[in-house]
């Protein structure tokens, strides 16, 4: 009976003891989680009193002492833990940091060397020693730690990443380059960090960094060089460096190209798009089947965006008529080709291709392509064909295009109606603003049709600004100032101003600023002041703007006029 | 000037202000203009310029502390109305009855009416080739329409500061280390210009190095304050001014600046009895880390020590008992988003006990905006570079204040500009 009781007691007491130990740890974690660092420190200490070598408690204590600036208090506990378990790696690290907090570099060195003797082939003691030195902002101490590790491990590439980061912090980029290349050769995952840190090199040092990288052998160095060139604004140069270094082995070369592409993708400059196209083309040449076709299509699209239509066509060749291509791919190729044809002004061919591919293309794609085609016809002045191509498109985008067609035909009432129906949501912000301006212009004119105005505005659409301004001025002469004459003079004046014809601009803007058209005068005065500021006639501009603000205090343009006044006076930067 | 004296003199002037204003006022049913500074104001920053120009034209004004977030009262003549209309400053015409009612409200609450008598003569310490958009105070003065003159080392060492009532320090590095950008931005054209300009000036003024020359400039500025001047400093000018003042006998400059490395024991050799605001700071020893000391709480240019931005809160003071501090914190916002600078904030542990904290980040170990007296003058330090450009990277587009007419951070700067107008006596004795 007594034996059974003792046995039962023993069995019960074992989990109880474990639970008793568990409970203070749970309490300590909880206090730490709640931000009660002083309470957590006490709880961790209690655990360590029972179990001096409890790694979790020691690390917890280290964590909570740090924010309360009491890190050095851990020292006796870390020493006790290390003494009770001399082979425990974790205690060496804590001990090192504790000596760092206590500002004892000699003790740090002693602990690191003791740790190194226990683990003779491991970089960790030197890495932790260096990190602890950096905690004390002691860069020479960190350098000593890493150099010592390199010497003792007899490996010239040991701790290369640490050396590199130290060199970057000291703005020693030549050393950083050398070390990073070594680090990446050992562990390619370091490439992103190397790129991020070397990328910070000041502008004047960059040629030297690239020159030094060029001297390093191997794909790792070439990839780093190529990616740095992209980061520093030379994507074409970067691609060339990478292309020349690509190995025969397909998987490795495709991976290098894919990483390079990832870097290029956020960039939208023409050079970056061209480099993206070339990267995709290089990837496509290494892939077969559907994946290769998809890459060729993407390359064609990117080349198209970059304006390199010849390269885009080269990529598309064969894709559309390839019976083995997935149908989605050949339709995509067709859409890309039609976009390119519209860009080249081959509208009839584009329209024909659109009719051919329409059954294969999705409804949304067809509508998009049709609108591009309409815009192309509009640009070419083929208003009837534009109208016909637009067909029965009753979306807001279609209505906005229809408003343009009516406007250029001189049907002012039809244009106003279509613009109003399109509302502010068709196209981008610039297009919406343009429509609002045109609507404002049309509202001031009483006539329902005015073909001469339509032709003038079409000239403007085409880019013949001087021709448009001259025609607008002639149309304005036929209209009373408050019934559109002043508005057209204002528009013509703005066009001359943008073209640098200051004399004509000022003459027209002054005419538009007359008191007989008070709805137009503030805008004309503002445009006049802007012209004067650009000519350096700041005093005249100030007088003009003051007149505007004091004469039309309730005009919506007054805040803008005040801003222009600030600019004329040099009170804010010109933007 | 002590606050007690200020109150005595301020109260006396209030009594005589009415006749003075009456002489200027036109015959009108609404002879006064109230410039509200609460959320009804269309352009808070230009309201300061409007008031400044009233004073500049020889007129008088009053500052209604804590009334509608620090409103101004100016005569309702045609010139002032026109000026307000052009500047876009909201005004409210007042008749005598309404003004008397307002004065009654001010009398009954934690408010006060402070007469503003004379437009202070303002100088900005700035290198000759600095762009006008490089410094928050220059931008604020330009935008508000407050006239100022530029001075630099030759003028400061040539003792011309006595001609000015108010001096702002551009974000200068008074330790002479070129903002500690020398190594990280080596070869950058703006840095090359800065170095050449400073070296030439040091040589011209007969100093062996830039740090030596800048220390002499710092001493001259402290002397200007001691004699009754007002100094307002932002960003790194705050910290480095005091470091330069404390560094006599200690080499705190890196080798690239004066040819000799920094004294590793410089922190222990500093003479904190010579400084305006700070004491017992630890200096940053690395020449490559653009940080000077632990005075700055945010350490923006140290990757390991950089602290995130929070917001700072302005203190409330008693307007009738403590008008100086009250003037400096007039605002329509009490909590303001923080912004970085080479020196963003001031750690509490390095503040001298005698200074007045005007704004702090609650529960953080740093404060943002401080004020103190030195001899017969006063100084105000405001951490950070540009209240409307919180990150402020080199090469950022300049801040356009017409896009920030209600900036509460910029209001604090302009409070400092008008503050000397409230003084009753010539400062430079």
Image (spheres, grey):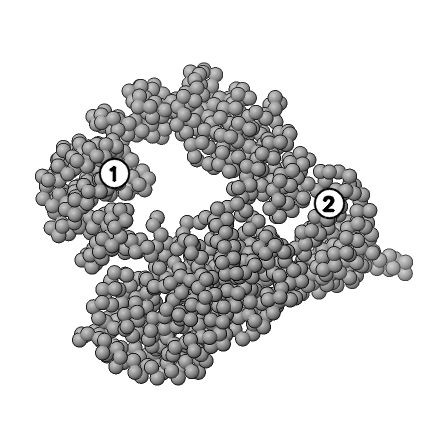
Can you give x and y, in whole percent of width and height, for residue B234 in the image? 47, 62
Q: Is residue A425 left or right of residue A77?
A: left
Q: Is residue A491 left or right of residue B204?
A: left
Q: Are marks 1 and 2 in contact (CB under 8 Å)?
A: no
Q: Please name the residue that numbered disc 1 is placed on.
A: A499
Disc on the earlier residue, 1 or 2? 2
Q: Are marks 1 and 2 on the same chain?
A: yes
Between residue A30 and residue A91, name the one nearer to us: A91
The numbered mark 2 sits on a residue in which chain?
A: A
Relative to A76, does residue A343 appear above or below in the rendering? Answer: above
Q: Is residue B317 left or right of residue B308?
A: left
Q: CA distance from mark 1 to mark 2?
A: 66 Å
Graded by Cα atoms within 10 Å as few (under 14), some (14 to 19) or many (20 or more), the crowding at tag 2 reads some
Residue A511 visible: yes
The residue that appears at 61% across and 48% down in the rendered structure is A169
The residue that appears at 30% across and 30% down in the rendered structure is A371
Between residue B247 and residue A52, name the one nearer to us: B247
* SS under mark 2: helix
Which image quadrant for residue A156?
A: top right
Q: Please name the residue that numbered disc 2 is placed on.
A: A147
On residue B400, the disc is none
Between residue B8 and residue B146, name the one nearer to us: B146
Can you give x and y, in whole percent of width and height, for residue B429 in the image? 43, 78
The numbered mark 1 sits on a residue in which chain?
A: A
Graded by Cα atoms within 10 Å as few (under 14), some (14 to 19) or many (20 or more), the crowding at tag 1 reads few
Residue B109 visible: no
Which image quadrant for residue A427?
A: top left
Relative to B409, does residue A441 appear above or below in the rendering? Answer: above
The residue that appears at 46% across and 36% down in the rendered structure is A267
Can you give x and y, in whole percent of width and height, for residue A450 in the image? 13, 35
* SS under mark 1: helix
């Amino acid at each position: 009976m007594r034996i059974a009781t003792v046995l039962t007691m023993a069995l019960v007491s074992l989990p109880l003891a474990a639970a008793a130990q568990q409970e203070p740890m749970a309490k300590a974690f909880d206090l730490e989680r709640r931000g009660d660092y002083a309470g957590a420190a006490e709880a961790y200490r209690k655990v360590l009193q029972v179990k001096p070598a409890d790694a979790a408690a020691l690390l917890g204590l280290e964590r909570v002492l740090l924010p309360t600036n009491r890190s050095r208090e851990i020292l006796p506990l870390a020493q006790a833990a290390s003494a009770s378990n001399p082979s425990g790696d974790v205690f060496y690290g804590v001990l090192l940091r504790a000596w760092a907090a206590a500002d004892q570099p000699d003790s740090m060195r002693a602990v690191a060397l003791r740790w190194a003797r226990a683990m003779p082939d491991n970089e960790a003691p030197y890495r932790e020693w260096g990190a602890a030195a950096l905690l004390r902002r002691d860069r020479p101490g960190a350098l000593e730690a890493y150099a010592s590790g390199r010497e003792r491990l007899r490996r010239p590439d040991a701790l290369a990443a640490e050396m590199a980061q130290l060199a970057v912090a000291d703005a020693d980029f030549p050393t950083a380059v050398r070390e990073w290349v070594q680090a990446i050769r050992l562990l390619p995952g370091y490439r992103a960090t190397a790129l991020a840190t070397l990328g910070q090199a000041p502008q004047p040092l960059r040629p030297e960094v690239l020159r030094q990288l060029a001297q390093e052998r191997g794909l790792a160095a070439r990839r780093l060089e190529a990616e740095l060139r992209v980061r520093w604004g030379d994507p074409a140069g970067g691609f060339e460096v990478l292309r020349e270094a690509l190995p025969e082995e397909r998987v490795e070369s495709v991976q290098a190209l894919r990483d390079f592409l990832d870097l290029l993708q956020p960039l939208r400059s023409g050079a970056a798009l061209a480099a993206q196209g070339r990267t995709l083309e290089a990837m496509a040449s290494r892939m077969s089947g559907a994946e290769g076709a998809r890459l060729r299509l993407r390359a064609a699209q990117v080349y198209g965006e970059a304006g390199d239509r010849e390269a885009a066509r080269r990529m598309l060749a064969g894709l559309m008529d390839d019976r083995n291509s997935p149908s989605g791919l050949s339709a995509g190729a067709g859409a890309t080709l039609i976009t390119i044809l519209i860009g080249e002004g081959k509208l009839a061919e584009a329209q024909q291709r659109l009719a051919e591919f329409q059954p294969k293309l999705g409804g949304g794609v067809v509508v998009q392509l049709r609108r591009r085609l309409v815009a192309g016809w509009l640009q070419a002045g083929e208003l009837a064909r534009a109208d016909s191509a637009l067909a029965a498109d009753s979306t807001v985008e279609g209505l906005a295009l229809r408003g343009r067609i009516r406007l250029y035909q001189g049907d002012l009432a039809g244009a106003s109606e279509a613009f109003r129906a399109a509302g502010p949501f068709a196209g981008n912000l610039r297009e919406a603003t343009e429509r609002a301006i045109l609507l404002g212009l049309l509202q001031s004119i009483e006539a329902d049709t005015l073909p001469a105005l339509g032709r003038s505005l079409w000239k403007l659409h085409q880019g013949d600004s001087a021709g448009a301004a001259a025609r607008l001025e002639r149309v304005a002469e036929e209209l009373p100032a408050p019934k559109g004459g002043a508005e057209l003079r204002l528009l013509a004046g703005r066009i001359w101003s943008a073209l640098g014809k200051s004399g004509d601009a000022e003459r027209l803007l002054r005419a538009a600023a007359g008191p007989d058209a008070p709805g137009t005068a503030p805008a004309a005065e503002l445009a006049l002041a802007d012209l004067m500021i650009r000519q350096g006639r700041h005093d005249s501009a100030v007088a003009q703007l003051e007149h505007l603000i004091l004469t039309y205090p309730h005009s919506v343009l007054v805040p803008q006029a005040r801003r222009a006044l600030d600019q004329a006076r040099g009170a804010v930067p010109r933007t | 000037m002590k606050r007690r004296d200020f109150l005595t003199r301020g109260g006396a002037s209030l009594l005589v202000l009415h006749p003075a204003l009456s002489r200027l006022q036109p015959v009108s049913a609404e002879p006064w203009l109230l410039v509200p500074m609460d959320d009804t104001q269309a352009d808070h920053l230009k309201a300061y310029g409007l008031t400044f120009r009233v004073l500049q034209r020889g007129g008088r004004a009053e500052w209604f502390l804590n009334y509608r977030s620090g409103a101004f009262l100016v005569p309702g003549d045609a010139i002032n109305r026109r000026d307000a209309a052009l500047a876009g400053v909201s005004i409210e015409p007042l008749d005598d009855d309404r003004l008397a009612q307002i004065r009654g409200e001010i009398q009954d609450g934690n408010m006060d009416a402070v007469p503003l008598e004379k437009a202070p003569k303002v100088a900005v310490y700035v290198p000759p080739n600095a762009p006008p958009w490089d410094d928050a105070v220059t931008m604020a003065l330009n935008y508000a329409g407050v006239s100022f003159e530029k001075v630099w080392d030759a003028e400061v060492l040539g003792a011309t500061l006595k001609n000015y009532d108010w001096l702002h320090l551009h974000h200068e590095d008074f330790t002479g280390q070129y903002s500690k950008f020398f190594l990280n931005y080596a070869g950058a054209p703006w840095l090359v210009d800065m170095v050449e300009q400073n070296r030439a000036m040091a040589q011209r003024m007969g100093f062996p190095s830039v740090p030596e020359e800048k220390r002499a400039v710092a001493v001259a500025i402290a002397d200007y304050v001691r004699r009754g001047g007002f100094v307002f400093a932002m960003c790194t000018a705050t910290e480095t001014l005091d470091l330069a003042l404390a560094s006599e006998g200690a080499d705190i400059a890196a080798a690239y600046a004066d040819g000799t490395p920094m004294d590793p024991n410089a922190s222990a050799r500093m003479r904190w009895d010579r400084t305006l605001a700070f004491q017992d700071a630890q200096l940053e020893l690395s020449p490559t880390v653009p940080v000077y000391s632990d005075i700055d709480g945010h350490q923006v240019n140290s990757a390991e020590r950089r602290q995130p931005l929070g917001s700072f809160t302005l203190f409330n003071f008693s307007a009738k008992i403590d008008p100086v501090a009250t003037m400096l914190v007039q605002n329509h916002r009490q909590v303001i988003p923080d912004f970085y600078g080479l020196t963003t904030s001031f750690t509490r542990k390095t503040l001298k006990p005698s200074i007045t904290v005007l704004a702090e980040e609650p529960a953080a170990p740093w404060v943002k905006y401080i004020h103190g007296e030195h001899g017969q003058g006063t100084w105000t330090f405001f951490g950070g570079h540009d209240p409307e450009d919180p990150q402020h990277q080199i090469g950022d587009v300049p801040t356009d204040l017409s896009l920030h007419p209600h900036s509460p951070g910029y209001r604090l700067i302009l409070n400092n500009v008008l503050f000397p107008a409230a003084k009753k006596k010539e400062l430079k004795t």
